[in-house]
Amino acid sequence: MEPVLAVTDLTVQYGGIRAVDGVSFHVAEGELVALIGANGAGKSSTLRAIAGLAPVAGGDIVLDGVSIRGVPTHELPRRGLALVPEGRRVFADLSVLDNLYLGAYSRPRHEIVESLRQVYELFPILRERSDQAAGTLSGGEQQMLAIGRALMSRPRILLLDEPSLGLAPVIVRQVLALLRQLRERGVTILLVEQNARLALEVADRGYVMHTGRIVMSGPARELAANPEVRERYFGTARARSASPGRAREPSMGESV
Amino acid sequence: MDSVTLPVLVDQLVSGLAVGGVYALVALGFALIFGVLRVAQFAHGEVYMLVAFLVLTALPALQLGGLGQFTLVLVLALALGAGLGLAIERVVFRPLLAAPHIAAIISAIGLSIALQYLAAFVWGAELHPFALGWSPGNLSLGPAVIPAFKVIIFVTALALLAALQLVLRRTQLGRAIRATASDAETARLMGINTTHIITTAFAVGSALAGAAGVLVAALYGVVYSSMGIAALVKGYTATVIGGVGNLIGAVISGLLLGVFEVLLDSYVSPKWSDAIIFALLIGVLVFRPQGLLGRAIPERL
Amino acid sequence: MSIARARLIPLVLATLMILAGCSIGGLAGAGREEIKIAVVGPMSGDAATYGQDFVRGAQMAAEKINAAGGVDGKKIVIEQFDDRNDTTETANIAQKIGSDPSIVASMGHFTSSTVYAAMPIYKANGLPLVVISASDPKITQQGNEWVFRVSPTNDIGAQAMADLMVKQLGLKKIATFYLNTDFGKSEHQYFVERVQQNGGTIVLDEPYQPDTKDFTSGIIKLKNSGAEAVYLSSYYNDAALLIKQAVASGVQTRWFASGAIISNQFPQVGGEAVEGVITARVARGQNWEAVAAEYRQRYGAEPTPFVIYAYTATQAIAEAARREGATRDGIRRGLEAIENLDTAIGSLTFDENRQAIYTEFEFLIVQDGQFKPWTP
């Protein structure tokens, strides 16, 4: 079956700096795919390039069989792509309801009520807070709003950029549980996350990025079990003490 | 000699609100454009001036009389303002969207000067009498007798402001404008074509300036090529005091500015009122850059 | 660096020589063929109409004199300068005129404020200045022997108006508005003093800033002042706007104003609201009317009084040059000696302060959009 999103040989360049260097991956219908890696590995740049927010120097991005490379950002929701940006980026001085309405900006008017019903069902807290300014919500609530807002466009694929960033651990768990729930409802998801352990807990498959390249990939469960991944990206005390002083480059081969 | 009586005070307040309504229209249009463009449209006052001149030129052909005349003139002013705004956006600002802000600011200042000279060249640098062709007489408001036209100006300004608020709050277009002002990149992620939103904000904001231009021309009975500067200064002051990006704040501080000015003129001295208002402006810029009415919004990234 | 300097020095020398050559040539020209008079005033901006009339009046007189053979065979040449009606610019331009040796006399500077700014500079340069519009009486009371005035002072006009309003028309409670400049303050002060001497009361004393377009606060005070009449020490734009806005605000009163409002612009800007406004000016004789008629024919418009004063100043300077020679000091001495000279304003005589003497007034009223003679 044709994947919903297929990225091939993607290269992103800011001036002389190559942030993403020939990255290829795909996300199939109904899948939850995690893109993990350390800070600065190029994960966010990859997402931003897909959303038309970062300069693509090479490669292609195909959404439902059609290239979206060079398509302006504001056209993408109409084509079924929604991105929940890093830092949530809710419209702070607009109400929660206005934020949700804006999520449906690309949709015909008559669909909005039904989308809103579904989002409220998923996030009852947003219904309670609907008249409040989004900036007054807690971090977790803002993350829910950001995801709810993205869902308002009824995307073919939902892209999330570091949804756990800046949230308390208990909230992070809630957010990831929610992603699992979404996946069960059939939403296709590409998740970029520094918290590899949690990401791999909910994902079907994962890709590991390092200095702009994908260095490892496979079913989430296998990656989560891989000692190298555990050591380098799970960041637990046990993993660290098990291999003291190791700081070498990962020597993981392609496992495709 | 200057004893304060109730009729005097009512008269002063109504006059202040009429002028303040005009300031609020200018301020709101300016704030709207600044919000989405992030560049001060310094030629905003020239839109106000040019619309007043264009309407003046068209007046001989408008002979409806009465309230119909007023409505017609107002609609014409809104349309001319919107048209001028669109032209200015297309010719001056759009080519500079990707350029550093300073380039757009300097172009706007240049445009302001060029349009003033253009108006002086086309119509002449002297004062031009402006007669609306309709005077609604006087109105008894309690013990005070005040010109009804001032009330009409205030009501018109409020109606336009309310209509804009309705659009901004209740329509997808309005939300898109506010979203673009709040965070343009995320707005694009919502599917909003922010370039179109900037164009729209120019049209709407300039339409308000056009309306303000004819209202003030009818109020003072005169049109002249340098009238835009005074309006821009007052509108800018109202925007800053209200808190840049706070549209309601711009409206409220525009109205208050009008009243404050009349009271200063009356009870301090006309000689000092501009100086006091500018001192206030500078004080706000230095000590409370988010504006007197603005709330501190946490920095977004 | 050294090459640049080597090139620069000859360049500077050459420039200096050219400049020197020019001014020597200028001097020679001035001494032989022409008498150059500077006409200075607002040639741009809000008051440019006045500056334009300065030049037109002077030019018309010069042409007349030159057609009749000039002054001992020398032609009168008018050169215009723009002081933008701004005191700073006035100081610069007066210095420029003063240091041009080809100029032997100057006339103008529109307002009392600009004349005050210019006076010491004329004195320092030893160049006679003939004032043709500024009306503060104190201008010619400073003991500056280089400053003459052919136009009337505002005290006599203001006093004539105060007499008319209080004594003849019996208006006792009078509101006043005045432009907060040297002109407005002084004309207002003479008016107020005379009203009080005549037994009237000033019920409102309201200054306003130059370029005021919104008279709201003053009008509200006027409405509640109980005034029977209003007197404006204003120029045409301010006066027209003030009256227009007051009438629109429901003020019903009798309006009187300084002679400075006399201009086509006044009824044009003021429209119907200024019908019936009364003002005063010095009486006009047949010479005045002859110049005015020529102006109307040439320019198709009504002349401001400044056309006639500029015309008169040119005549006086020509006469002075004829008497004492076409030098700066000669013209100064010649002007001092003038007595009963037949000019555009009629018979011109300077008093001991070098101020032209005026004795007769006439009143005007705005009717059908025009100033028309009026008798109380």
Image (tube, coloured by chain):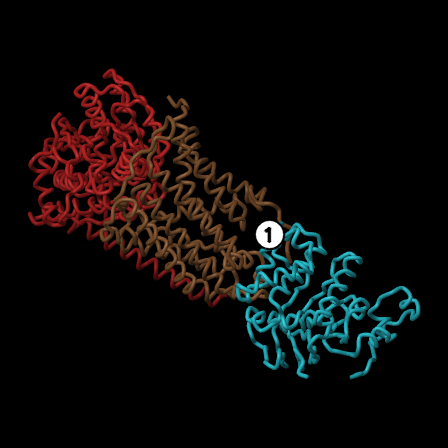
Chain colours: A cyan, B brown, C red
**C326 or A107, which is in the foreground?**
A107
Quadrant of the image occupied by residue C18: bottom left
Residue shown at the point (57%, 45%) measured from the top left: B294
Picture coordinates of residue B1, whole percent (x, y): 37, 21
Residue C175 lies, in percent from the top left, at: 29, 25
Q: Which residue is mark 1?
A: A93
Secondary structure of the residue carrying numbered label 1: loop
Residue A104 image-quadrant placement: bottom right
Seen in the picture, residue B23 relative to A170 is either above or below; the reply is above
Give x and y (percent) for residue C57: 16, 44
The answer to whether A176 appears left or right of B35 in the picture is right
Classify residue A233 as left or right of residue C236.
right
Q: Is residue B129 above or below residue A202?
A: above
Q: Is B230 positioned to the left or the right of A181 in the image?
A: left
Figure quadrant of residue B273: top left
A256 relative position to B16: left or right: right
Q: Nearer the viewer, residue A50 or C106?
A: A50
Chain containing the residue with disc 1:
A
What amino acid does circle 1 point to?
Answer: Asp
Q: Is residue B83 visible?
A: yes
Quarter of the image containing the C terminus of chain B?
Answer: bottom right
